[in-house]
Amino acid sequence: MADHADGTPAVLFLCVHNAGRSQMAMGFFEHLADGRAMALSGGSEPAEHVNPAAVQAMAERGIDISQASPTRWTDEMLHAVDVVVTMGCGDACPVVPGKRYEDWVLDDPAGLDVDGVRPIRDEIERRVRDLLARLGLPSSAPLFAPPASE
């Protein structure tokens, strides 16, 4: 499926502000793919910074997205990937013939505190793991389990 010289699959995660869902998806994808695939993310109307609650929720999983910057998607991004995953951007998300598209219906974490973001984060993790498996790159990393309370 990959059209890259080295055969590495590439995925673009898109949402409106590129500040929550797509950043968490890219963080999980890069962590779980462990160099076996490439991820990009972008938005149609990028925010000024990544959602702090999303940063905190990902840090709980040991994934640091604090240095990520919301970015506007570009035609170059679209043409550089094999799979485009859209998350709530509707008609604002671009369509390029010949690309594989997936639309992940997820709540928007904008304005939520970390307690509200956690269920969205967990669903994104499940979907990223499923996507990696369908790309032939299953992750051997276990699902995160919170420490048992005493």
Image: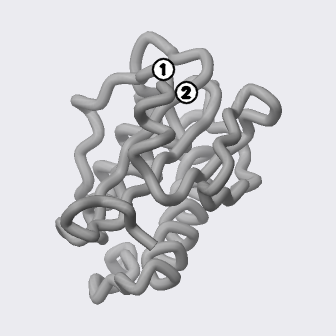
Q: Do the residues labelled 1 and 2 touch (CB within 8 Å)?
A: yes
Using the numbered discs, state the Cα–Cα distance from disc 1 to disc 2 in whole angstroms.
5 Å
- Of helix, strand and loop, which one carries label 2? strand
Residue 71 place in picture, x, y as percent: 42, 22
- The residue that appears at 27% across and 67% down in the rendered structure is 8
Between 109 and 101, the residue placed more toward the observer is 101
For the point 48% across and 20% down, which residue is it?
72
Looking at the picture, tell me which residue is in the foreground, 131 or 118: 131
Is 81 on the left-hand or right-hand side of 37? right
Give the image location of residue 132, x and y in percent.
Answer: 43, 76
Residue visible at 72% across and 34% down? 89
Q: What residue type is labelled 2?
A: Gly
Density class for disc 2 (Cα within 10 Å; few <14, some 14-19, many ≥20) is many
Label annotation for residue 85: none
Relative image position of residue 74 (x, y in whole percent): 48, 25
Q: In which quarter of the image is the C terminus?
A: bottom left
Q: Name the residue under label 1.
A: 72
